[in-house]
Image: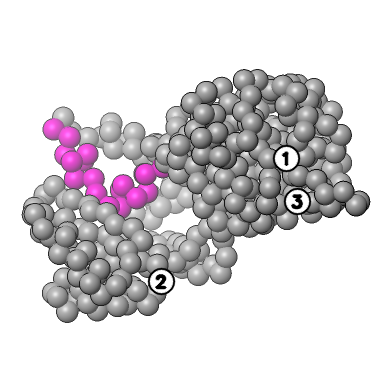
Amino acid sequence: MRNRGNAMSQLTCGFIGLGLIGGSIARALKKSVPDIKIIAYDINREALLLAKEAAVADVVTPAIDASFTQCDYLFLCAPVRGNDGNLAAVKAVMKPGCLLTDVGSVKTAIHEAVREAGLEESFIGGHPMAGSERVGFANSKASLLENAYYILTPTARVSREKVEAYRNLVAGMGAIPLILDCRKHDYVTAAISHLPHVIAASLVNLVRDSDSEDGVMRMVAAGGFKDITRIASSSPAMWQQICLTNGSNISSLLTDYIGVLTEFREQIDGRQAESLYEQFESARIYRDSFLGASSGPIKPVYGISVDIDDKTGALARIVTLLAERGISIKNIGITHNRESEDGVLKLEFYGEAALAEASGLLAAEGYAPRTRS
């Protein structure tokens, strides 16, 4: 609830698009803002029905209509090109003072579209740095935004009061607001998000094209390869759009990366042991600094790996040992190496104390756990 003069008024937020990100923001707002009202539209009727059944959306509409004239905030959560196309319809239903925002991972293009639509005084771009390999409202959750950076890109004409109010709203959802210029945002995300997806996709395609007819590379692809190429499983349509809308930044960084790879190749061909060591050592030091950050989405992983026999009861025995000691498991998974009958059990815990206790317990039982990050 907010106080406007002497009158109390309900906060009303509208969502144009209610997939994974839009749904997660709506859930987080329901959790963090008392008595909020949420109005939603999506081309997917099933998403709207699920949102209504889950009491996330209070009102669902079949179009961008007059229902949205009540909104204090309007979230554009459709795909990038969809957001641009929806601006005219949104402008027709926005009330004075309504704050318009989006959730796209490319910001300059939407800022240009907003300027052409005459909505600069009402717009703050938004990009929650969170996501999942699963998509759609059915997979949305309020916790998706917790401790994730949420980048805000205000226009030059939006008021400081609107920026501060939106910043507080984002912080209330458990995210970490960070204000950037839209052009700087696109360069940063090109480096830490967009380029890695291009690299992952190209590496997977390289292995596919280099593999033998009996598929040995695919058969033995294990931990390291799977870890660095996991993002290649993301939506091809989404990444096609990102490459088209942030192409200049991605291309510039890709040129720099090709230069780095060329340098690596020259050091390998020249058997330059000291230079190669420095490449890997400097990368290790910088990468490890991510895990030491005190805030943000990248947190230390309290995990261990344990070799287990691939047979009935092997997993159950370890889980039972931990449960009997009262040690909660945050995440669990098994990686198989098809060259042998063994598997590697990966366990993740909620804190350092639980990790230490689990490691000691399993070591005493002869499992020789290995710490991982």
Place of residue 249 in the rendered image (x, y in percent of width and height, measured from the top left): 61, 39
Query: Mark 2 or mark 1, which is nearer the start of the sequence?
Result: 1
Query: Mark 3 or mark 2, which is nearer the start of the sequence?
Result: 3
Which is nearer the eye, 81 or 252?
81
Name the disc covering residue 318, or none.
Answer: none
| As drawn, 184 above or below 363 | above
Is 223 left, or right, of 249 in this rendering? left
Q: Amino acid at mark 3?
A: Met
Q: Which residue is mark 2?
A: 351
Name the disc covering residue 12, or none.
Answer: 1
Q: Amino acid at mark 2?
A: Gly
Q: Which residue is mark 3?
A: 1
Q: Residue at x 70, y 32 (%)?
A: 110
Query: Is residue 164 visible to the viewer in this orientation of the structure?
Result: yes
Could you tell me how far apart the alpha carbons at marks 1 and 2 are, in whole angstroms? Answer: 38 Å
Decide: marks 2, 3 in contact (CB < 8 A)?
A: no
Principal secondary structure, stretch drawn in magenta: helix
